[in-house]
């Protein structure tokens, strides 16, 4: 996989949707609280804190799954906001307790800003690939959109 700016773009394919889900209260209530769905808060927390990033200390993920210092700072802000809610409700509290916590809007706000920056940076990276002449599918001489 070719990517300008990060060493682990496949990690980012999981990090960005996790951030986006934290930015959407509607998604949280419709998906996380439906026991028949795959995604819940626990899944998102594992992606952002345990498996593919460390929202408590995101600095070491710069260049791996985070593109810029701004993303690192915003991820740290998200981690801090989430940590305050977790401290208030308890790590083992059900998703509903997190969503109803007084500090949850701060988590949503931090995630929304981070999502905006991450998606903007991803679009810029995609535009840079296009401008550099990368084609899709590779080796066809075709650029996305069907022109050559």
Image: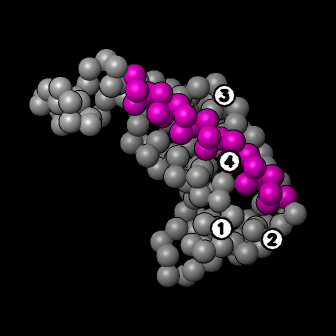
Q: Which residues are magenta?
A: 103-128
Q: CA distance from mark 2 to mark 4?
A: 18 Å
The residue depicted at 61 percent of the width and 35 percent of the height is 117
Mark 4 vs mark 3: in front:
4
Q: CA distance from mark 1 to mark 3?
A: 26 Å
Mark 1 vs mark 2: in front:
1
Report whether 6 appears left or right of 113.
left
Mark 2 vs mark 4: in front:
4
Q: CA distance from mark 2 to mark 3?
A: 29 Å
Q: Label 4's element?
A: helix
Mark drawn on residue 70: 3
Q: Is residue 45 above or below residue 67?
A: below
Mark drawn on residue 100: 2
Q: The N terminus lies in which quarter of the figure?
A: top left
Is 144 magenta? The answer is: no
Q: Along the polypeptide, which appears first: circle 1 or circle 3? A: 1
Check the image and tell me how it is coloured.
one colour
The residue depicted at 47 percent of the width and 42 percent of the height is 12
According to the image, label 1 marks what residue?
26
Q: Are marks 1 and 2 in contact (CB under 8 Å)?
A: no
The residue depicted at 62 percent of the width and 40 percent of the height is 116
């Amino acid at each position: 996989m070719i990517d300008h700016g990060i060493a682990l773009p496949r990690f980012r394919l999981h990090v960005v949707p996790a951030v986006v889900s934290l930015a959407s209260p509607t998604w949280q209530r419709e998906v996380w609280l439906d026991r028949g769905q795959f995604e819940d808060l626990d899944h998102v927390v594992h992606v952002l804190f345990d498996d593919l990033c460390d929202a408590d200390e995101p600095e070491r993920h710069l260049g791996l799954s985070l593109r810029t210092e701004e993303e690192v700072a915003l991820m740290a802000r998200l981690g801090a906001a989430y940590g305050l809610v977790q401290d208030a409700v308890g790590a083992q509290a059900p998703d509903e307790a997190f969503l109803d916590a007084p500090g949850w809007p701060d988590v949503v706000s931090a995630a929304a800003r981070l999502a905006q920056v991450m998606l903007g940076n991803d679009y810029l990276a995609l535009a840079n690939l296009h401008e550099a002449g990368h084609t899709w599918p590779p080796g066809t001489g075709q650029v996305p959109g069907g022109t050559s």
